[in-house]
Amino acid sequence: MARAWTALLAVRVVAVRVVAVLLVSGTAHADRYEASLHAQAIAGTALVGDAASHELGLAPLAGLGLRASYARANAWQYDAQLTLAGTGDASFARGEFRFTGEPVVAPFAITTRLMRLDAGVTWRLGVRVVPTWRLALGVQERWRSAPRVGGDGPQRDDADGRGRVHTTELVGVSGVGLDYRLGPRWVVGGSLGGSVAVASPRWATVEASLHLAYYWYPRWLD
């Protein structure tokens, strides 16, 4: 009987310690009232359209992002992100051009540079290990290069005066991710998502990112 009481007392002590650790951990890593800055490295693929072709081209995408956030509740935060990115060649099997007034049908390639500013909400579904889901809307400035026209032979950089093209477009952004909280201040994580622009020619991306974030607690914002 004495041994049973001793074992029961030991179990109660362990249970109390576990609950205490969880409570302290939850308090120390509370999400509400947090502000943060995230530095991101981005890589992915872009689906690119061009007025010279009815086809769509694929191109590798790489860039950097900077996100700022503020949490109004444990489960979600407001955030805004600035993204700077560019693509490699998006190749098209055939495009329609005019050189010195003559119609030409030939393969071509273009590259793209972009600057995107979006704002939205991120839902956070954990404390230390944190699944996330982000939805955002924004504006994107996109610069497409002059087409490089030609196949395996000589390439021409322009077609009857067509140069670089600049467009401003609305864009929707979404992504799911997983963060890991190293402590009250630092978080590392990754995400997989993409963007779709309301534009002509078409533009869409699939983006994977890794980020490092710093958190602090400016209660004066509340």
Image: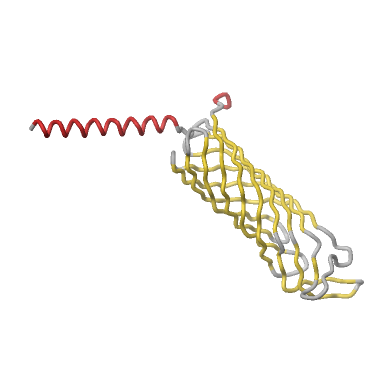
Find the residue positioned furthest to the top.
220
Please state if 40 lies on the left or on the right of 89 as rendered: left
Indicate whether 193 appears above or below 9: below
Left-right relation of 102 to 219: right
In the rendered image, residue 89, in percent from the top left (x then y), is placed at: 72, 63
Comparing 85 with 78, the one in front is 85
Residue 180 position, x and y percent, is: 47, 43
- Taking 60 as reference, is 92 above or below it? below
Residue displayed at 66% across by 51% down: 63
Colour mapping: secondary structure
Residue at 75 percent of width and 73 percent of height:
94
Q: Position of residue 96 (x, y in %)?
A: 80, 72
Q: Quadrant of residue 154?
A: bottom right
Give percent across and percent down for residue 104.
83, 75
Residue lying at 58% horizontally and 37% vertically, measured from the top left:
69
* Front residue of this view, candidates 12 and 51: 12
Q: Given the current orientation, which residue lies at the most extreme right position?
A: 100
